[in-house]
Each structure stands twice: as structure tokens, then as C-alpha cells.
DNA sequence: GCACCTCTCTGACTAAAGTCAGAGAATGTC
DNA sequence: GACATTCTCTGACTTTAGTCAGAGAGGTGC
């Protein structure tokens, strides 16, 4: 990480927050306090739980409560108790709120246009492409991979999605409870470890390691949410899992997978894993890989 | 300007202001209101005139006055009257202020590092490169080209720099008052027009048009500040001047220039101008161009 | 010397943003 | 059924941010 990189990022921050940040605040905030505009924006067309809002905007509960009250008084949102759990409140846009959001959208478009108009066509293309890169890489950088209990709701959610995806893509019905080889206690310290990848506090991937004293560690249940693919996240998660296996004392790691998971196959092949003969009888597996950990 | 471009910019704004913007506010602002931090930052190591600060941060004079008072009370800055004009006040950082600025710098570096660390080396390189592109293109986009009176101080500044540069780069001494062909009244409506390019309210380029009823318009005094080169600004300024010539009724435009201005030569050649025999006797000129306006 | 600038400061405001402690309802846990 | 927990709301605050009108000191041009 060179000084020149750091310097470049600082220049970027300066230019972008000055130009985009300040402008977008002005654009969005006109005629409505910025806080309210942000809330309105974040609620979105489909409504949203209040606690979600609080988490996403990281606002004080009292403050948010007041903001919502003010929006309700202006007739832009309506609040109601959530049906299953009546402590939770759900906020929805009224028709007027949707109109307001549309004008916010228009302003946001106008801002975007104001950035593009002074540029020539090739410059515009380069700007948009560069913005796409920055946005994707910052998104990638903001993913956090955290050790999580395999029975934590987020872990369960990921596992369920993983199974659903396998079944969707494969003819064989995969039932994780039949011949289960990654039971909670097997991927929980000290036997192993389970990781969940979070993007803005939402689970978007998982993976597990099973330690085996004096034998290769196993990497299991690696999954990335479709919405988070193409960010290079798989590579990062895999590196994390390998590091975990190594830290657990393994010198070699094993992975088995199904040929229907084509992204996984190419990921393994491009990161130093070599295909080996079957080393177990996982019913859904048809490819087996091995890697020597450095 | 496609919808996809607009959409991409909106996504960018969202991601970047959420990630970089909010973070950098938090990073910079800790233990000190953001307003004060920004002022401290903008004063810089070498001190600065108060009116400069006001212009650059576009703050109300009363508000800035109070911010400076508060910084002075914390012992971070000292104020003194400027020596030539005692109305103007100059702010300087004290030793404590410089320390404080260093910690701001460190935080800014830490922020930059926090963006890079989760990424792989190739990703880092791409992020930095994309940030450089975005920063440069946004800078370009934020340049405003405004019609300005040729005797306005900003216009005079640009002209003086233009002359100085010609003399620096050429053996011939160029004296704009000898055989002057772009006198103020010639490049002021209705006879012509003078343009100044502003970047953050500072003049970074100029150019003039002289209309000639029923004859080719002349483009004159085109100059871009060295600090603003490489932004594609010359091309934009030239387009503006051509548009002005066209709006003034010309169907053809003329430019003469000196071979020492190599960037200008290649700009003209790459934007549809064709070299023609000398059409005037400008003492410093050795290349003459013509372009049919669409 | 006079009128007219320019730059800065002060006082008197308002609005927005954010914090904190605690109350109250609904729910899950044993 | 008691108890802890979760989620939301209220009241009482503080701090930032920003605006506006006007005063006063210092300059410039004639």
C-alpha cells in the first residue's frame, strides 16, 4: 500500500465529497431537512421496518422517532405495527410520500446530469466506467467477514440459501441433513469455525472450516449471495477460510464441490487448488480439490 | 447521456457518500466540530487570508469569524492584519494547530488505508486508478467557462500568464502591446467576447473571439494554466470559442499560434482545424489554422 | 477631504442534528 | 406467571450550522 495510493485516495475524497457530497446534499435537501430526505429515501417504495431504518442510517431511536413523526405530520408516511411482532413498527410511504420521493429521484438525476454535461462523450464514458469500478470496489471493501455461530439466524439464512441454490441448479436433490457433514458442532470452535460475510450488516455469504488433528482441514458450505457476486468476494472468503485452516494447524486443505457450481470450480482452479481423486463420499460432490497451505 | 449512465452515477453517489463521505466526516470530525476541522484543514501549513477561506469554503463572514474565534480560543490559530492592507486578516496555525492538522492528516490516511486493506493487490490498483479517473473527470466537469470582461482582474491575470508563458518558451520577446490585435474593446461585446475558465472560483484559462462581419472570426489568447492541463479543458474551451464565433455569425474561424505551443498545435490538429498559409502578420505566429464552423 | 468601497466583526436570531435517560408496550424464556 | 429483552416513544437537553442586518476600521479614487 504505497504512499501514492494513499495520497490519491485523499485527493479523491476531497474532490468527491466536495463536489458530489455537498452537491447531493444541496440537491436532495432542498425544501426539506436533509435528515428527513435521507429517511424518506431509505424507506423506499416498499416500506420498511423502523428498526431497519435505524440500523441502516445509524440514527438514535429518539431522533428517528421524531423524524418519522414529522414526516407523518406532513402526510408523507404512515406508520403501523408489524403483524407478527407488534413491537416493531413498519413505515410506508403515502401517495404524497411517493410523489416526494419521485422529486428526490429527479433531483438526483439532475445532479448526475450536471456532472456529465460539461464532459465530452469519451470523457463521459470514462467517468461512468471509473465510477462503476470505484463503487464496486468500495462495496467489496466494505464487506466484513466475521466468525459466527452456525446456528445464528444469519448463518442459518445463508445455509438455507446455499441448499436452495444447490437444489435449483442440480438434478440431484441435496438434503443437508442426510449424511450431514457440517453439523453445527463440527463447524463451531474448537472443532471448526463458521464465517458469515456481511454487506451493510446483511449476510451475503458464508463458509465453514472443519479442523482434523493431523489430517487435512475441510472447507465446507461456501456460498456467495447472487447479489454479491462479481465483487471478488469468493476469493476473499476462501483466503479467510484457508487462513483459518492454517491457524488450526492444518498443512493441507480439502474441498469437494459439485460441477453445477461453475463459479466455484473456476475460483478453486485459479487460486492454487488442484483437482484430486475423491477423498470422501459426499453424495452431491463430483469434484474434489486439495491445496497445500503455505 | 444514457439512463444507464445516470443510474450508475446515482449508485456511485450512494455508495461513495455513504462509505467515504460519512466515514471521512467521522474520521476528520472526531473531537472537533466538522466546520472547525474543515477550516483548520483549509488554512494549511502556510496560513491563508480570511477572505480566501471564506471564498473557498463559501461560508458566511459572520460564521467564519466565529469559527476562527473559537479556534483562536483553543490556541490552534493566530490572526493578524495583513501588512499591505490592514483590512485583510491573515490566519496562521500555531504549533498546536499544526499538531492538530497532523492528526487530521493521520486520520485521513487511516481512512484511506481502511478502504484498501480488505482488497487484494490487483483490486487496490484498480481502485486507485479508478479514483484517479473519477477525481480528474469531476475536476474537469467542475470547471466553468464564463464570459468575462477582458479588463476584469481575472482576465488580466490570465493574459499576463499567457504572455509570460509565451516569453518563457519562445526566443522572440512577445509584447502584447506591440501590434496588439486583441485589445479589450475588440474582444468585448459586440465586437467579440472574452472567456475565463474557473476552477473552484480561480481562473485557470482564457480565450477570446473577435467577430468580423462577413469574414472569418478570429480566436485569440487561448491559454490553460499549467496546473489545469491534462484535463481535456483546452478542447472544451476551444469548443466554447467556436460556438461563440458561430453564434456571432461566422462560418469560418481563424487561429494563429506559435510552434513553441506544442499542446495547442496538436489540439487544433485533432479538432478539425487545418493548417493554411499565413493570413496575418502576428509577429510571434508561425502557424495559421482555419476551420469551417458547422 | 469626501464619497464610496472592502473586509471583518458583533449581536440576535433560527433550524437542524444529535444525545441521553427513562417510560411503556409487546414478546420470548424459563 | 415472573423476568428479562426488544422496540419504540417522550421529554429535556446540547451542539452545530447557518442567516441577516448593521457597525466600524481601513483603504481607494477623485
Image (cartoon, coloured by chain):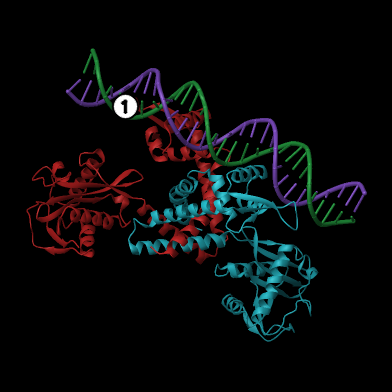
Chain colours: A cyan, B red, C green, D purple
Residue A122 in sight in this render: yes
Q: Residue at x 12, y 54 (%)?
A: B285
| Whole-percent x, y for residue A22 in the image | 46, 46
Residue A7 in sight in this render: no
Foreground of the two, C3 or B80: C3
Task: Classify mark 1: helix, strand or loop.
Answer: loop
Q: Residue at x 43, y 28 (%)?
A: B79
B83 in relation to B179, above or below: above
Left or right: B225 with respect to B167?
A: right
Residue identified by numbered label 1: B85
Total number of numbered discs in the rendering: 1
| Dot 1 crowding, Cα within 10 Å, few <14, some 14–19, many 20+ | few
Instruction: Locate the N terminus of chain B by quadrant.
Output: bottom left
A225 in relation to B160, above or below: below
| Whole-percent x, y for residue A159 in the image | 71, 70
Chain letter of the residue beneath label 1 in the structure image: B
| Whole-percent x, y for residue B128 in the image | 46, 59
Q: Residue at x 12, y 59 (%)?
A: B288
Amino acid at each position: 500500500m504505497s504512499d501514492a495510493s494513499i495520497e490519491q485516495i485523499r485527493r479523491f475524497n476531497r474532490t468527491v465529497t466536495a463536489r458530489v457530497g455537498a452537491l447531493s446534499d444541496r440537491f436532495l435537501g432542498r425544501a426539506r431537512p436533509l435528515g428527513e430526505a435521507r429517511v424518506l429515501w431509505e424507506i423506499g417504495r416498499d416500506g420498511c421496518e423502523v428498526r431497519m431504518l435505524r440500523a441502516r442510517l445509524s440514527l438514535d431511536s429518539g431522533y428517528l422517532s421524531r423524524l418519522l413523526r414529522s414526516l407523518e405530520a406532513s402526510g408523507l408516511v404512515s406508520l403501523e405495527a408489524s403483524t407478527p411482532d407488534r413491537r416493531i413498527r413498519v413505515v410506508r410511504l403515502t401517495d404524497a410520500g411517493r410523489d416526494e420521493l419521485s422529486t428526490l429521484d429527479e433531483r438526483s438525476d439532475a445532479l448526475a446530469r450536471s456532472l456529465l454535461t460539461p464532459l465530452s462523450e469519451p470523457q463521459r464514458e470514462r467517468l461512468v466506467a471509473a465510477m462503476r469500478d470505484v463503487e464496486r470496489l468500495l462495496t467489496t471493501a466494505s464487506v466484513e467477514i466475521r466468525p459466527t455461530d452456525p446456528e445464528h439466524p444469519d448463518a442459518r439464512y445463508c445455509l438455507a440459501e446455499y441448499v436452495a441454490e444447490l437444489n435449483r441448479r442440480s438434478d440431484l436433490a441435496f438434503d443437508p441433513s442426510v449424511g450431514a457433514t457440517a453439523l453445527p458442532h463440527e463447524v463451531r470452535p474448537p472443532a471448526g469455525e463458521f464465517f458469515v460475510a456481511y454487506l451493510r450488516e446483511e449476510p451475503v455469504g458464508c463458509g465453514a472450516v472443519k479442523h482434523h488433528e493431523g489430517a487435512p482441514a475441510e472447507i465446507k458450505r461456501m456460498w456467495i449471495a447472487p447479489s454479491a457476486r462479481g465483487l471478488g468476494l469468493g476469493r476473499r472468503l476462501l483466503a479467510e477460510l484457508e487462513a483459518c485452516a492454517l491457524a488450526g494447524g492444518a498443512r493441507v486443505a480439502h474441498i469437494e464441490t459439485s460441477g453445477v457450481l461453475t463459479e466455484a470450480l473456476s475460483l478453486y482452479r485459479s487460486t492454487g487448488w488442484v483437482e484430486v481423486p475423491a477423498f470422501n463420499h459426499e453424495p452431491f460432490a463430483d469434484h474434489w480439490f486439495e491445496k497445500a497451505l503455505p
